[in-house]
Image (spheres, rainbow, N blue to C red):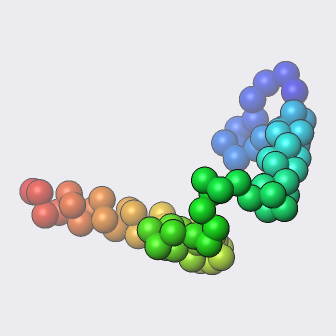
Amino acid sequence: MTEKPITEDYVPLLPWLGAMWWGAAAAQWLMRRPPRWLGWPLPELARPLAVLGRNSLIYYMLHQPVMIGLVLGYGWIMR
């Protein structure tokens, strides 16, 4: 690729596919041999993050309108 495309969400497949494969391999390895410091089962403070991970599409679709609403509400209140 010689010049950056117009869209910001385009990422070339290589070299990032290799980084994704390394991460997936590391996750599989950790799932088979979990170290003691990882603390299975999840600590109580991490449970909300686990819920977000299980419902990632819902979070993805809702987080920006919620954040924009919070910023607009903050701006409205601070006027």
Q: Is residue 18 shown above or below 52?
A: above
Say left or right for 67 vs 23.
left
The single residue placed furthest to the front in the displayed view is 36
Residue at coordinates 81% horizontally, 49% vertically from top-left? 26
- Residue 67 occupies quadrant: bottom left
Identify the residue at the far left of this view: 79
Instruction: Say which of 59 and 42 sits in front.
Output: 42
Q: Residue at x 57, y 70 (%)?
A: 42
Residue beneath the point at 30% across and 59% down: 71
Q: Nearer the viewer, residue 26 or 66?
A: 26
Total number of numbered discs in the rendering: 0
78 relative position to 30: left or right: left
Examine the image and state in which quarter residue 56 appears.
bottom right
Is residue 74 in sight in this rendering?
A: yes
What residue appears at the point 81 percent right and 58 percent down from the top-left corner?
A: 33
Q: Which residue is at the far top? A: 2
Image coords of residue 66 (percent x, y): 41, 70
Q: Is residue 37 above or below residue 44?
A: above
Q: Is residue 52 visible?
A: no
* Whole-percent x, y for residue 3 in the image: 79, 24
Q: Image height check: is 71 above or below 44?
A: above
Q: Quadrant for the N terminus, please.
A: top right
Residue 20 to residue 5: above or below: below
State which quarter of the image contains the C terminus: bottom left
Q: Position of residue 74 (x, y in %)?
A: 21, 61
Residue 18 falls in image quadrant: top right
